[in-house]
């Protein structure tokens, strides 16, 4: 079972949420995940190299982003703009203020699939879908314009999106988001060059055939985004969060005890292989932004 289109990666990720939901000690509950993943999502997960073994990381990513979203809302976010929403159901499953505005943005076919599977579901806040191709000029400006009308701080979410973009595309996105004065926070996930060269390399042939090659893996995410007007306020290594949440990586016990002493450099690299970052809007981006975009 191979991935035919980049949109099918959302079915794959939804399958991890479905399996977590079915655990007695689930970190979160997503009652729509299994239906959304379907048989295709399950077959993709089981056929990808390390597909089942990487479930812990996807589950932890979801749980930590849940925490960060709630934290930003507690700090005053009035609107959430979820770019490349895929099959995310946070607007329906999280405990959210009723007056919060949540905008899920994705390609038209993905939005149609979402609406079909969420038919009859009641959102926890003021929710709407926007069908848009963010690779084209204009749609991001329109989406942010609608969010701006809500009149309050905006939280941007881009889970599982940046990794498929070229660095220049990520830079353009960062600049476009920074141009919106109300965009105060940005939550996204980051992978390292090491992850791209290991597990990512095993996935790459199948993903590339579907137009979903992994591309963005900055060596220093704080530096990359800092040059574009976004300060890395928090960085949460998935490895560390997995231990805290009770979903440790395979062999984590060895690396966290013996490996940390015998191979400190290797242990440090493992801890930084993937993470969740909370970025904050800086009033003025530093000079040199144009060189980053190139």
Image (cartoon, rainbow, N blue to C red):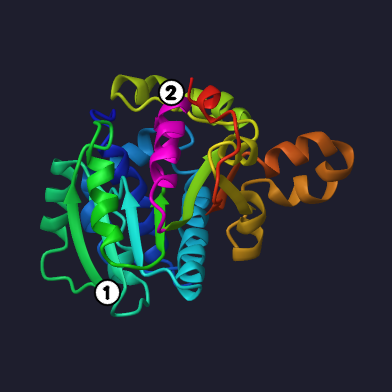
Of the pair 263 and 101, the residue shown nearer to us: 101
What numbered label is drawn on residue 260?
A: none
**Residue 193 rendering spot, x and y as whole percentages:** 60, 28
Where disc 2 sits, the SS reads: helix
Query: Image point 62% across, 58% down: which residue?
Result: 241
Q: Are marks 1 and 2 in contact (CB under 8 Å)?
A: no
Where residue 284 sits, quadrant-wise, is: top right
- In the rendered view, tell whether residue 3 sits above or below residue 55: above
Q: Quadrant of residue 84?
A: top left
221 sits left or right of 84 in the view: right
Q: Main secondary structure of the magenta part?
A: helix
Where disc 1 sits, the SS reads: loop
Q: Residue furthest right?
A: 261
Of 121 and 35, the residue lying toward us:
121
Which residue carries the number 2 mark?
204
* Residue 166 in view, yes or no: no
Start-end of magenta stretch: 160-182
Q: Is residue 273 left or right of residue 136?
A: right
Q: List x then y, in percent, for residue 69.
A: 45, 64
Residue 125 sits above or below residue 200 on the image: below
The residue singled out by tag 1 in the image is 125
Rendering quarter of residue 246: bottom right
Is any atom of residue 150 visible in this view? yes
The mark nearer the N terminus, 1 or 2, is 1
Residue 103 highlighted magenta (yes or no): no
User: Residue drawn at (32%, 39%), measured in percent from left and top?
Assistant: 9
């Amino acid at each position: 079972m191979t991935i035919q289109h980049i949109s099918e990666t959302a079915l794959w990720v939804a399958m991890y949420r479905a399996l977590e939901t079915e655990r007695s000690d689930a970190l979160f509950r997503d009652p729509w995940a299994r239906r959304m993943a379907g048989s295709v999502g399950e077959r993709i997960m089981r056929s990808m190299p390390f597909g089942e073994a990487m479930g812990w990381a996807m589950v932890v990513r979801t749980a930590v982003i849940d925490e960060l979203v709630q934290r930003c809302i507690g700090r005053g976010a009035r609107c959430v703009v979820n770019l490349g929403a895929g099959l995310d159901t946070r607007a329906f499953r999280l405990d959210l203020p009723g007056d919060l505005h949540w905008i899920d943005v994705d390609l038209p076919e993905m939005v149609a699939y979402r609406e079909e599977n969420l038919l009859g579901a009641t959102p926890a806040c003021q929710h709407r879908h926007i069908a848009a191709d963010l690779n084209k000029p204009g749609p991001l400006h329109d989406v942010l314009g609608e969010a701006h009308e809500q009149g309050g701080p905006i939280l941007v979410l881009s889970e599982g999106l940046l990794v498929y973009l070229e660095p220049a595309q990520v830079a353009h996105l960062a600049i476009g988001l920074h141009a919106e004065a109300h965009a105060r926070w940005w939550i996204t996930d980051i992978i390292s060059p090491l992850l791209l060269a290991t597990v990512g390399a095993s996935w790459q042939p199948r993903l590339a055939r579907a137009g979903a090659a992994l591309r963005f893996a900055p060596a220093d995410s704080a530096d990359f985004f800092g040059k574009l007007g976004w300060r890395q306020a928090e960085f949460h290594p998935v490895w560390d969060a997995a231990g805290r949440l009770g979903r440790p990586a395979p062999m984590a016990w060895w690396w966290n005890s013996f490996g940390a002493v015998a191979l400190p450099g290797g242990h440090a690299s493992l801890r930084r292989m993937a993470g969740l970052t909370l970025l904050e809007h800086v009033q003025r981006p530093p000079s040199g932004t144009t060189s980053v975009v190139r």
